[in-house]
Image (cartoon, rainbow, N blue to C red):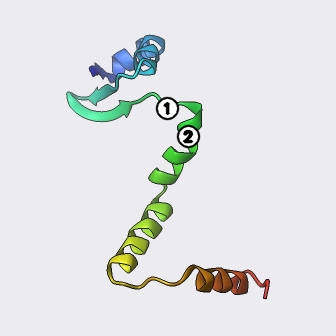
Amino acid sequence: MKFVNVKELKNKTSSILHYAENGDDVIVTLRGKPYAVVHHLAEGDIEDYILLNHPQFKKKLKNAYKEYLDGETVDIDQLIKKTEKDLGRI
C-alpha cells in the first residue's frame, strides 16, 4: 500500500496507476487526511463493482436480507408468477 497526496497524483498519475495495476492500493490524501483510494479494477470486475456500489442496489439487497431474516420469503414459483403479472405477461 502506498500513500500519495493530490499533487503527487496529478504529477505522477501514470506511475501511480501502474502501481495499482500490480495489485497494490494507493491511498490519496488531501491536506494530510485520507481522501480516496486508487484500486486496480479488471475489465471483468466492472459490473460487480458498479452493482455493489450503486445506492439503490445496496438498499434492495439490505431490504431483501431483512425480509429473509424476518422469514418473509416466498416460493420461487410464486415469485415467478408475481413477476410475470407485474410485467403484464399474465
Q: Position of residue 14 (x, y in %)?
A: 48, 13
- In the figure, is residue 56 to the left or right of 36? right
**Viewer-closest of 52 and 28:** 52
The residue at 33%/83% (across/down) is 70
Helix or strand or loop: what does disc 2 sit on? helix
Q: Nearer the viewer, residue 89 or 10?
A: 89
Dot 1 alpha-carbon crowd within 10 angstroms: few under 14, some 14 to 19, many 20 or more: few
- Is residue 80 shown left or right of residue 35? right
Viewer-closest of 88 and 11? 88
As shown in the figure, which amino acid type bears the numbered disc 1? Leu
Tell me where residue 80 appears, x and y as whole percent: 65, 80
Q: Position of residue 61 (x, y in %)?
A: 44, 66
**In which quadrant will I find the C terminus?**
bottom right
Q: Which residue does the numbered mark 2 point to in the structure image?
A: 46
Name the residue at 62% across, 83% down: 77
Which residue, given by chain and number where applicable, does mark 1 sit on? Answer: 41
Residue 47: x %, y % from top left? 57, 45
Q: CA distance from mark 1 to mark 2?
A: 7 Å
Q: Report the number of discs.
A: 2
Name which residue type carries label 2. Ile
Give the side of residue 45 with respect to residue 86, left or right: left
Asked whether the beta carbons under mark 1 and mark 2 sit within 8 Å of each other, the answer is yes
Vertical order, 6 against 62 (above or below): above
Q: Quadrant of residue 86?
A: bottom right
Residue found farthest to the right: 89
Q: Residue at x 39, y 79 (%)?
A: 67
